[in-house]
Image: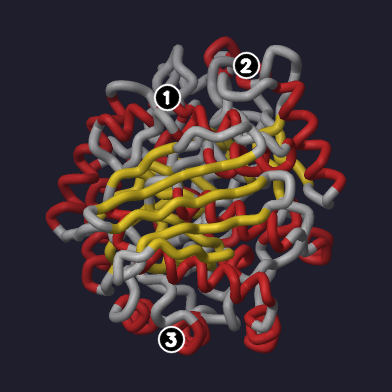
Amino acid sequence: MTVKNQVQLITYPDSLGGNLKSLHKVLTRNFSDLFKGGVHILPPFPSSGDRGFAPTTYLEIEPDFGTWDDIKLIGENFDVLVDLMVNHISKQSVFFRSFLKEGRESEYADMFITLDKVWEDGAPVQEDVDKIFLRRERPYSSYVIEKTGEPELVWTTFGKEDPSEQVELDIHSEKVKQLFTDFFHKFHENNIKIVRLDAVGYVIKKLGTSCFFVEPEIYNFLDWMKELADSLDIELLPEVHAHYTTQYKLAEHGFWIYDFILPYTILDTFINKSSKALREYLKGRPQKQFTMLDCHDGIPILPDMEGLIDTQEARNVVDTCLERGASLSLILSDEHKAEDGFDVHQINGTIYSLLGRDDDAYIAARAVQFFVPGVPQVYYAGLLAGENDYQAVKDTGENREINRHNFTLEEIDESLAKDVVQRLMKLIEFRNEYPAFDGQFSVMNSTNEEIKLSWEEDNKHCILQVDLHTNRTVIEYTDDQGNLTSYNV
């Protein structure tokens, strides 16, 4: 499998029309030639929480969304990417339900990380816990075993609930390795071309460390996963929210990585009307990346941007976003906050709203994303220039639902009629079709008030020019006759 250097769509299975059949209909009717890079379908599997990210199994599709046949059908026309949450599975899974019933006598007991696997007597030591990169107040939950009536402490990295819905898997367990093997074979049978290893940074537990991206052990796991994926012609995309140097280590190891630096950097560029930080960043980054402006989570800041931002300046960007209706996800571990107390993990809001619902700024930001080397992904809410969904936040109590609106078929048609959406679709077509994007990229000299990026391949050459004062965006390119022409984006 070779990842295509063309634009991908990110969507939930039910966000474009309600289910996988409607997603296929929308894709083939409206976007048949648009997402030639593929479609990332966020978890379509049975799940007990976290909008699909607490799956009970990967061997089935959630019946409310459809069936594997629906996925396979989409895969006939689009390269499909799905997530594998390699560090956890739902407490409602058949495996953990057996553990809850039988405890250590369950045939699946070894699949989970009881705390005696970490601390010899099973009692957590606060000094060790203080070093861990926490995603909840403590990295474990207490579950009562039905057979004995006794509590059992089990590692749980994620989950708002207590005890958590998302129970950590022990990647050293042979049963877990077999389970992953079964999942990958099911993916292969159903036209899955790329698998995102979600939360892979949390798979190693080692005392004295943050228990996040523990080296060199994590590479042993990733190499094993890659060997499995390669045998089935599936590409891997490790997902790691961490200091950018951690991402670069993955790139050096030969993996595709996510550019989690770009969304905030572009947002900062358009809010502060300065390209200085963006230009500096683009001169040294690895090119084998997936790029994005928006996704089902928020705009990453810490720990991804640590060392790349002035936290006082970042507060100004955050405050502007709050004025535009955003909400925030915060860092819980004191050790991972900035020295001055800055603690913003992610900014939550649609990218269209965060850019002030300004059509020109939004299109200019997308143009910059598409000119940055890598495989561009466009989140469905961004595709349709969606605005913040405050009702969804109110209904669910989940801040991230602000950027997870489910569009009906009628709402999709209404959105497609917007000028900004038509402009974006035309821009996607240019990014997909113009051959220079397979060539040589360069950041051209410019003032801080403008952006100039170029691509060149043989006799094809294109230049993006953005005026940050007016957000006017122009692409100059060589056409098929060798003439220089311009395109007002």
Quadrant housing the N terminus = bottom left
- Around disc 2, counting alpha carbons within 10 Å, would you say few (fewer than 14), some (14 to 19), or many (20 or more)? some
Q: Position of residue 339 (x, y in %)?
A: 69, 12
Identify the amino acid type marked 1.
Answer: Thr
Question: Horizontal and vertical percent for residue 470?
Answer: 73, 51
Sequence-wise, the earlier of marks 1 and 3 is: 3
Residue located beneath label 3 in the image: 28
Mark 2 = which residue? 335
Q: Residue furthest right?
A: 323
Asked which secondary structure carries label 1, the reply is helix
Report the amino acid beneath label 3.
Thr
Q: Nearer the viewer, mark 2 or mark 1?
A: 1
Mark 3 Cα shell of 10 Å, populated few (<14), some (14-19), many (≥20):
some
The mark lying in front, picked from 3 and 2, is 3
From the viewer's side, name the closer residue of 333 and 312: 312
Q: Which residue is mark 1?
A: 245
Q: How many neighbours does mark 1 have within 10 angstroms: few (below 14), some (14-19), or many (20 or more)?
A: few
Q: CA distance from mark 1 to mark 3?
A: 39 Å
Question: Is 50 drawn above or below residue 62 in the view shown?
Answer: above
Q: Residue at x 21, y 58 (%)?
A: 2
Residue for point 25% across, 32% down: 253
Asked if residue 80 shows in the view, the reply is no
